[in-house]
Image (cartoon, grey):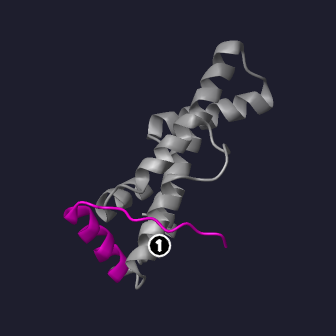
Amino acid sequence: MNTQLITVNLPKSLYNRIRKRAEESKRSVEMELLDVVVSAMPEGDELPENLARAVQELSLLDDKSLWRAARKKLDAKSAARLASLHEKRQSQGLDNTEAQQLEELVSRYERVMLVRAQSAALLKTRGQDVSRLLTKA
């Protein structure tokens, strides 16, 4: 692996947060900092800009905020409308307004799921047990 040595001056409070995360995950400060940088700068342009930004910002959150993000769901009204539009599309088809609404709801759902998944992944790299996210609550 080709690497580049750099020196970064961090505010003491930020360094302490990274050091604490490293200790909790039983990793070096260097590896923890590298993980933060990699999380903030994903390779390629695989995600639309709005989704990439949402994912990048997650690495800056503390564990409590990440747990909230990992548990977030599409609101019940939107989830019900999404399901009904899917059913209608399969049985009758959708008019232009309904098709646009379905597209918007799918986009919101994908964003919620991506944020949940990335939040869980970050929590896991920080040494948290995320298995409880797999159970229905």
Work out whether residue 132 can be spotted.
no
- The front one of 77 and 10 is 10
Vertical placement of 108 versus 55: above or below? above
Can residue 11 be seen here? The reply is yes
**Quarter of the image with the C terminus in it:** bottom left
Q: How far across and how far down the image is residue 99, in percent?
A: 69, 22
Crowding at mark 1 (Cα within 10 Å: few <14, some 14-19, many 20+): some
Please report the residue visible at 54 percent of the width from the left and 52 percent of the height from the top: 41
Is 129 within the magenta?
no
The kind of residue on which mark 1 rests is Lys
Quarter of the image for residue 90 reads top right
Up/down of 36 relative to 72, above or below: below
Q: Residue furthest bottom?
A: 26
The quarter of the picture where the N terminus appears is bottom right
Q: Which residue is mark 1?
A: 124
Outermost residue on the top side: it is: 96
Residue 52 found in image quarter: top right
Across and down, in percent, residue 18 comes to 32, 69
Q: Residue at x 46, y 34 (%)?
A: 77
Q: Position of residue 91 (x, y in %)?
A: 79, 30
Left or right: where 60 falls relative to 5: left
Q: Which residues are magenta?
A: 1-23
Q: Is residue 3 left or right of residue 39?
A: right
Query: In this picture, is 104 found above or below 14?
Result: above
